Image (spheres, grey):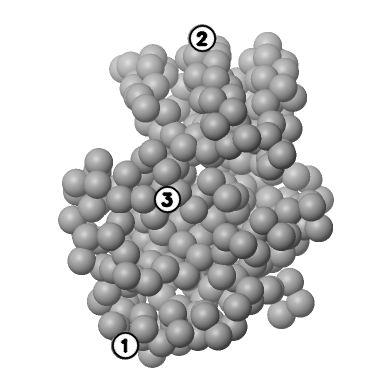
């Protein structure tokens, strides 16, 4: 596949061999959601995240869209500027999402707005995601989605439910709102998960999920940013295969991604390579 780079084929083959020897009962899949399980561009339109669909429409309000886009214009360029020290970027992401969640609550975000975003058809799962979930479900391999989704866990559940993929082996760790009886968001639970602090969000903090994967020492990690590598914190893994989706600015970021991932999927590619790997392991 033209848009796939295997960084070190020998190293990958050795990892794959060890994982296959341990068997599928020792395997788990750890994945980001936005721009990893979903396409980064739909019908030629860039979709940065589920929250961006709300931000770039008047589903909530024109005032919200204007204020949210002002925040995005300030902070978005910081998020992907690898020349800025990581500590500074992390602080800025925290600052951004605290302001944005406050804005969502003040703008009267309601569960019905999340439903409208899901119905907009601007969220598109990558080709092959359905097969990935079906293989994992059939072989009882847990999928842990660790996401900084700005519309919270309900948005991810809604997308997967729409595609009939919310299987019992699928577990989601994401931001979570508190809702009143009218379905209005009244608070965001802390700590807030953002793109730069997944290394601070330990799966051990979620005992109902951790007990499902604590003895599964082999990991396939899927992410689109270097911050997603932190998802593996808190997992006492034996072998890990890291697959990175480099969706844009490939030339600028290629060297950094090669140093961090085992396999790269370039230019918003599909899940074909991931599924081929998984099929080898479970056969």
Q: Is residue 123 visible?
A: yes
Q: Write the residue at 56% across / 70% down.
A: 262
Label 3: element kind:
helix
Q: Write the residue at 71% across / 64% down.
A: 266
Question: In the rendering, at what x and y percent does residue 230 appear?
Answer: 45, 49
Label 2: element kind:
helix
Task: Provide the residue designation for mark 3.
Answer: 231
CA separation, marks 2 and 1? 53 Å
Question: In the rendering, at what x and y percent does residue 231 appear?
Answer: 42, 50
Please tell me whether residue 79 is drawn above or below residue 21 in the rendered image: above
User: Marks 2 and 1: which is nearer the front?
Assistant: 1
Front-most of residues 36 and 84? 84
Circle nearer the N terminus (1, 3): 1
Residue 238: quarter of image: bottom left
Q: Quadrant of the C terminus?
A: bottom left
CA separation, marks 3 and 2? 31 Å
Residue 240: quarter of image: bottom left
Mark 1 and mark 3 residues within 8 Å of each other at the beta carbon: no
Circle nearer the N terminus (2, 1): 1
Q: Write the residue at 63% across / 35% down.
A: 85
Label 1: element kind:
helix
Residue 100: quarter of image: top right
How many C-alpha atoms fall within 10 Å of the one at disc 3: few (<14), some, or many (≥20)?
A: many
* Marking on residue 106: 2
């Amino acid at each position: 596949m033209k848009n796939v780079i295997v960084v070190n084929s020998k190293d990958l083959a050795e990892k794959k061999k060890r994982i296959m020897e341990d068997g599928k009962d020792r395997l788990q899949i750890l994945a980001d959601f936005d721009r990893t399980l979903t396409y980064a561009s739909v019908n030629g339109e860039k979709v940065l995240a589920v929250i961006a669909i709300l931000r770039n429409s008047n589903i909530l309000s024109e005032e919200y869209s204007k204020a949210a886009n002002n925040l995005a214009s300030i902070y978005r360029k910081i998020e992907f500027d690898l020349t800025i020290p990581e500590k500074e970027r992390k602080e800025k992401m925290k600052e951004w999402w605290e302001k944005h969640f406050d804005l969502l609550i003040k703008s009267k975000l309601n569960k019905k707005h999340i439903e409208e975003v899901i119905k907009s058809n601007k969220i598109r799962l990558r080709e092959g995601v359905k097969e990935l979930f079906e293989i994992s479900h059939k072989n009882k391999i847990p999928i842990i989605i660790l996401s900084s989704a700005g519309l919270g866990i309900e948005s991810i559940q809604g997308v997967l439910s729409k595609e009939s993929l919310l299987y019992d082996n699928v577990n989601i760790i994401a931001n979570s709102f508190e809702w009143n009886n009218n379905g209005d968001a009244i608070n965001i639970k802390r700590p807030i998960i953002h793109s730069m602090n997944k290394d601070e969000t330990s799966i051990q903090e979620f005992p109902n999920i951790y007990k499902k994967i604590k003895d599964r020492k082999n990991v396939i990690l899927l992410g689109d940013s270097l911050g997603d590598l932190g998802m593996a914190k808190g997992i006492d893994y034996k072998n890990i295969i890291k697959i990175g989706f480099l969706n844009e600015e490939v030339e600028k970021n290629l060297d950094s991604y090669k140093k961090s991932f085992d396999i790269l999927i370039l230019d918003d590619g599909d899940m074909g390579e991931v599924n081929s790997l998984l099929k080898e392991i479970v056969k």
